[in-house]
Image (tube, coloured by chain):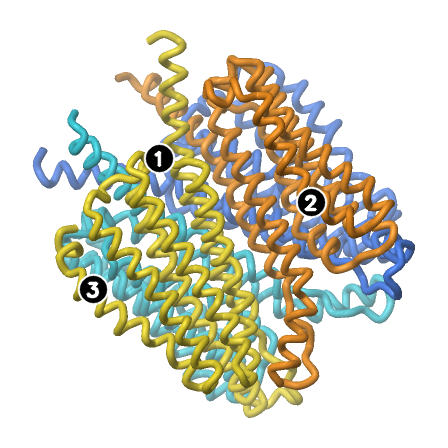
Chain colours: A orange, B yellow, C blue, D cyan
Amino acid sequence: MNKSNHDKEILAENRKFQLERISLFSDAVFAIAITLLIIELKLPEMEDFSADAFLKALNSISYRFFGFLFSFFFIGMYWVIHHKIFYYIKEFNQKLLWLNIFMLLTIVMLPFTTGVAFEFMTFPDYPFMLYAINHILVGISLYCLWDFLGNSKNISVGLENPRFIKFKKARSLTVVLVFSIVIAMGFVSPFWSRISPILIFPFFLLIKKRFKDVIENK
Amino acid sequence: MNKSNHDKEILAENRKFQLERISLFSDAVFAIAITLLIIELKLPEMEDFSADAFLKALNSISYRFFGFLFSFFFIGMYWVIHHKIFYYIKEFNQKLLWLNIFMLLTIVMLPFTTGVAFEFMTFPDYPFMLYAINHILVGISLYCLWDFLGNSKNISVGLENPRFIKFKKARSLTVVLVFSIVIAMGFVSPFWSRISPILIFPFFLLIKKRFKDVIENK
Amino acid sequence: MNKSNHDKEILAENRKFQLERISLFSDAVFAIAITLLIIELKLPEMEDFSADAFLKALNSISYRFFGFLFSFFFIGMYWVIHHKIFYYIKEFNQKLLWLNIFMLLTIVMLPFTTGVAFEFMTFPDYPFMLYAINHILVGISLYCLWDFLGNSKNISVGLENPRFIKFKKARSLTVVLVFSIVIAMGFVSPFWSRISPILIFPFFLLIKKRFKDVIENK
Amino acid sequence: MNKSNHDKEILAENRKFQLERISLFSDAVFAIAITLLIIELKLPEMEDFSADAFLKALNSISYRFFGFLFSFFFIGMYWVIHHKIFYYIKEFNQKLLWLNIFMLLTIVMLPFTTGVAFEFMTFPDYPFMLYAINHILVGISLYCLWDFLGNSKNISVGLENPRFIKFKKARSLTVVLVFSIVIAMGFVSPFWSRISPILIFPFFLLIKKRFKDVIENK
């Protein structure tokens, strides 16, 4: 093999590794964001060192602990989706890099908005709305990524069926829809606002039913 | 090679990389959790800047430093187990992804519960019990992963011998058992509760002896 | 294959993985630096838990939030450049390792200087100048990396065209130039100093135009 | 290919990836440790927002900033050594895993001991001695790793020359020696104690000279 061909081979290999690096950089960002959630969790100062005072202190952060679990589940889910997205990518370009960085931006903000949402409660429930806006931004970035892949045949692979992209985009929009409901409810009642994210499960099931054909074809 | 075959090959490669990404994402989470332990370690304010005041300040966190070493050892051990688990995996599905995320959840909580357990001591010893509960959850998640692999011939590889899975499940349950003893002892004496995790060594040796045949077959 | 050849093959493979490890270590550092930015973002204590007090608290950190977005964009851009640099590398040596570590040093300082620049404002605008110095250091480290690759034919690949290296070096120097303007403006007006980083966009376009030939050849 | 052979091939590939995971997990720990150094760096509260007050505040942390650079350089160097070590590894076993975890333990403690050493100064200089002890532990862990590889022909590759292992062990012991001098000097003068780490450069050069033959053979 002559030098020029050897160089081309190395560049092709490097190119492939560059694609993997995007996933690995994203993985590291996801991993840090999901782990930073626990840093927010801190026991308040205790008056004395009795078992009762400890249980009281523990109880006082139970709501924040719930917020930790809540965001851990969602960041986990977003990672699973990111994981799926890159299954269908065979090449990358500048636009994909920056769409991915935008997605990571929305993920990185989650530990902050989680801390805010599960520490304060006001009426109207602005802290939780801020948290919902963050999730809406994640949903939008996921939508953009799927939309971009569906329209970029030179970058994606295995996405020939337009109904499959439609299915993925519908799922991303569900995140946007559910957290829009959360915002609307925030003006009515903090309680119902904070319960509404659970709507994501029936909505996901509905979409699964409607797009049964493409999931089974997969 | 025609286009469709070429695409299938890319997708197969991507699929393989997706499996590796699960390990790499987990590695990052483990690495952050094990490193966050040190953030909890902070020297208290010193009255003056004499050598004596410094030694006194250092001494006042010696117990927390021990907690750091303690959790570092255990997170290290859990990483080694996670490392072993993925040796036997050739494919993944949604359930494996979520079992793995559940395992990471239990790992991520360890820096928090470590901080709590090695800062406070009450009677009954609730802070250390909380820490023990965390380890029990890790043990359960490990058990679930081994159990899942043993029952999923299409995902696992090299796990034909049911006695080997039994061995791995027994080891996971040992973690659960030892930290259950820790909790029970917490109602009797904080001192003995905090000593009992050492039981993991004789228990692991016992299991090693009983399952000698499968380890040697490996 | 005899033992010695087999060993050589393993060492060659290890060597290749060693090169990948440099990227992956760098990715982890970039990922942590970009995520640490959010840790700086903390809501101030609120007087009461009314919605108004919350909006006021939120408003009080709006400038720091802008700083978070600002640095997130720049660290993202630097990562994209780092990503591109390693596309042209086929080997490594001690000098590359240390140039890379120097680059990471400049990246790791960004969360600190971001925090400083977007919390204080003095006249002359020293906090923002410190931030600008940090970006200048990043620019210099990028310049050094491109310069090193251009002069190391045994390490780089696909960089035969000297005009292409010139283009990359010109871009790195643009970062240095723009943030030098930021520093100069800091002695005139904090407002104009903080606006000037935007100059990077027209300057990058100008360079793109002048080096149109090498970009299209790529 | 029959099923059993196919399984063996997958297990062999997994085994190879398991080896890479050790490096990648270590990289993540190194990356976090090197980045955590900057978290310690915080500007003190300022009386007013004048440029002078800012410069004064900046000046007050200049020593800690030097400590940041100091530890960044050393962690960088230890990463480079770790990077080299794994070049010579073709297999792993439990002992290697735990030696590596021990090495990571010593690295993870560096952000803590850096913070202590560059915040306080007492006489005798205990804070800097604590920092020196940490470096001594790193040196010992490096020595153990090289020693282990030299004695494990089934795990290492390319380490046939015993003089080469001797060279690497001598370098590790230099770290131990230099920081032992640091400790001894701490009882004499904090100033000279804090200057002595610079001895690592002449000592490394001396060793390089004495082992010139093995380095050139490499």
Task: Pinpoint the chain carrying mark 2.
Answer: C
Observer-nearest of C62 and A3: C62
- Determine if marks 3 and 1 fall on one subunit: yes
Question: What residue type is disc 1 on?
Answer: Glu
Name the spot of residue A212 as percent of width and height, x first.
53, 21
Q: Secondary structure at mark 2?
A: helix
In contact (CB < 8 Å): disc 3 and disc 1 = no
Q: What residue would you read off at disc 3?
A: B208
Q: Quarter-wise, where is residue C213 in the image?
A: top right
Question: What residue type is disc 2 on?
Answer: Ser
Question: What residue type is disc 3 on?
Answer: Lys
Disc on res. C71 = 2
Q: Residue at x 39, y 47 (%)?
A: C94
Q: What residue would you read off at disc 1?
A: B91
Name the spot of residue A204 as percent of width and height, x first.
61, 32
**Horizontal placement of A89 versus A126: left or right?**
left
Compared with D107, B101 (above or below) is above
